[in-house]
Amino acid sequence: MKTEELEEHLLDVERVLVLQGRRLEKLEEGTEPTPPQVVKAPDYGSQFEELKALLKRQDLSAQALQIYAQIASFRESITRLPKVLPVRHYHHFEYRSRGFVIGGGVCLLMTAISAGLCFSLYRENSRLQESNMK
């Protein structure tokens, strides 16, 4: 860039900055600072006292004893279970699953035939390319 172009560009930037400064001054004059407002939290003391009174009326020890008795009965029933549960494995194909087995076999057969055909065609193509005279 030439010096004239740089000077012109610099003058444009200065004009824009002056305009921005004027706008900021106008905005600052129009707004007055507001004092911070104090927010008071409501008093929950009376409600807490009611909750304390309700909790004192409840007999929590009886509930704890019931829970302890349930845990003890669970432990007893768990110890009575055998370590290894007997399971009889019996695998068989139902009549309805016969079609799936046959379909899977046909798919495997088709895959093997396709792979063999691809391999033989690849070998034949390689042989023909070697004998091709260009």
Image: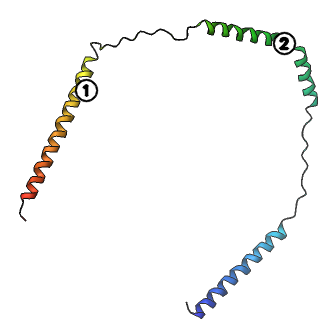
Q: Where is residue 89 in the image (x, y as percent from the top left)?
A: 39, 12
Residue 126 higher or lower than 83, as above or below: below
Which residue is rendered at x = 82% and y = 69% of the image? 28
* Secondary element at tag 1: helix
Residue 33 higher or lower than 83, as above or below: below
Which residue is rendered at x = 62% and y = 10% of the image? 78
Disc nearer the start of the sequence (2/1) = 2
At label 1, the amino acid type is Gly
At label 2, the amino acid type is Ser
How many marks the image carries: the answer is 2
How packed mark 1 is, by other alpha carbons closer than 10 Å (few <14, some 14-19, many 20 or more), is few
Q: Which image quadrant for residue 119?
A: top left
- In front here: 58 or 115? 115
* Secondary element at tag 2: helix
Label 2 close to label 1 by CB (< 8 Å): no
| Residue tagged 2 | 61
Task: Report how far apart the C-alphas of labels 2 and 1 lie in the structure.
Answer: 65 Å
Which residue is rendered at x = 25% and y = 17% of the image? 98
| Image quadrant in which the C terminus is located | bottom left
| Image quadrant in which the N terminus is located | bottom right
Q: Where is residue 11 in the image (x, y as percent from the top left)?
A: 67, 87
Which residue is rendered at x = 76% and y = 77% of the image? 21
As drawn, the residue found furthest toward the front would be: 83
Q: Where is residue 111 in the image (x, y as percent from the top left)?
A: 21, 35
- In front here: 80 or 31? 80
Q: Position of residue 27 (x, y in %)?
A: 79, 69
Q: Answer left or right for 130 relative to 84.
A: left
Residue 53 higher or lower than 127, as above or below: above
| Residue tagged 1 | 104
